[in-house]
């Protein structure tokens, strides 16, 4: 035991553990502070203690009982938009990546580099153009105009395709083409070989792209803030600003409670897709 203690106190061993625990404290500390703030009825960050003097559920009750700030509706809007966006991104990206991976056609290489080049410019640079595009589109197709969830999803799709196409194409390249050739010899069409052979084998990367897209859309603020205006259509990231934007009534306790509840869908989705996420992020090939 003394030998183990001496080994632990060695400088080369000690600084590694100190660094690890410092990183853990840096990551967990804000979460603990938010949990503490959500149970603090003082509803302020000034003088907040790690353990509230009189902990209560007052912030949670205000969060769900305030008709002017419909947090459950905001959360539902966010989950709905994120799920639809992630599903469409996975569906469209898988088709595009399969075409780039398996087919040889004119402009294939140029198209791949064009997607990558366009993706290098963030959507924020095109904010004015996006706003005017939806404003113009809303005159002809109101369901895709400003202050609509469909229009916001339409914008999210444009920003999520590039990198995901490259990511999924690289995964498709690792799957042997002999599997599709065998399916074709058995009478399968190219599309049947795609969704019966390729998609089941590519399930890990599909889960990775779905989760990353869902998480990115779930926490997105700027585009939703510009394109959505009515209170009942806001996403959670935009709606929560209401609690801390008032100069004279900043409700940090309610904001903390909303942040904790808002994290539940991400945690649940991660738990459901954990095996696929680990496999998709670490495995570079499919072994038969």
Image (cartoon, rainbow, N blue to C red):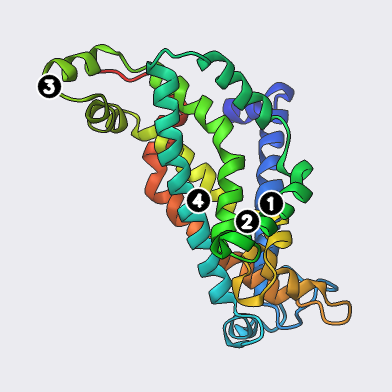
- Identified at 60% across, 27% down, the residue is 115
Please, is residue 103 above or below residue 88 in the view? Answer: above
Label 1 or label 3, whichever comes before in sequence order: 1
**Disc 4 to disc 3, C-alpha distance:** 34 Å
Q: The residue tagged with tag 1: helix, strand or loop?
A: helix
Label 4 or label 2, whichever comes before in sequence order: 4
Quadrant of residue 273 in the image?
top left
Residue placed furthest toward the right: 247
Q: Which residue is mark 1?
A: 133
Quarter of the picture containing the C terminus is top left
Quarter of the picture containing the N terminus is top right
* Nearest to viewer (mark 4 / mark 3): 3
Q: Which residue is mark 3?
A: 187
**Disc 2 to disc 3, C-alpha distance:** 44 Å
Q: The residue tagged with tag 4: helix, strand or loop?
A: helix
Label 4: few (<14), some or many (≥20) within 10 Å?
A: many
Position in image of residue 23 (x %, y %):
69, 40
Position in image of residue 210 (x %, y %):
46, 43
Horizontal side of 243 relative to 106 (left or right) equals right
Label 4 or label 1, whichever comes before in sequence order: 4
* Nearest to viewer (mark 1 / mark 3): 1
Q: Which residue is mark 2?
A: 137
Position in image of residue 239 (x %, y %):
67, 70
Please, is residue 201 above or below residue 22 in the view? Answer: above
Q: Which residue is mark 4?
A: 85
């Amino acid at each position: 035991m003394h030998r183990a203690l001496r080994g632990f106190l060695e400088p080369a061993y000690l600084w590694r553990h100190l660094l690890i625990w410092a990183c853990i404290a840096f990551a967990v500390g804000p979460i603990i502070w938010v949990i503490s703030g959500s149970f603090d009825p003082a509803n302020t960050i000034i003088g907040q203690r790690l353990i509230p003097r009189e902990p209560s559920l007052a912030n949670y009750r205000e969060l769900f009982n305030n008709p002017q700030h419909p947090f459950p509706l905001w959360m539902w809007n966010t989950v709905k938009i994120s799920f639809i966006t992630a599903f469409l991104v996975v569906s469209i990206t898988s088709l595009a990546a399969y075409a780039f991976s398996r087919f040889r056609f004119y402009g294939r290489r140029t198209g791949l580099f064009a997607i990558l080049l366009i993706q290098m410019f963030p959507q924020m640079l095109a904010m004015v153009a996006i706003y005017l595009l939806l404003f113009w589109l809303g005159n002809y197709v109101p369901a895709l105009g400003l202050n609509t969830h469909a229009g916001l999803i339409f914008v999210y799709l444009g920003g999520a395709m590039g990198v995901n196409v490259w990511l999924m194409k690289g995964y498709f390249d690792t799957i042997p083409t002999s599997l599709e050739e065998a399916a074709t010899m058995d009478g399968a069409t190219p599309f049947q070989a795609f969704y019966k052979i390729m998609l089941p084998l590519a399930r890990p990367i599909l889960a990775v792209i779905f989760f990353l897209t869902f998480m990115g859309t779930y926490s997105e603020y700027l585009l939703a803030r510009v394109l959505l205006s009515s209170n009942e259509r806001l996403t959670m990231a935009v709606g929560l600003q209401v609690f801390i934007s008032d100069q004279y009534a900043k409700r940090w306790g309610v904001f903390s409670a909303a942040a904790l509840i808002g994290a539940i869908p991400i945690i649940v989705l991660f738990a459901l897709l954990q095996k696929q996420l680990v496999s998709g992020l670490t495995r570079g090939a499919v072994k038969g």
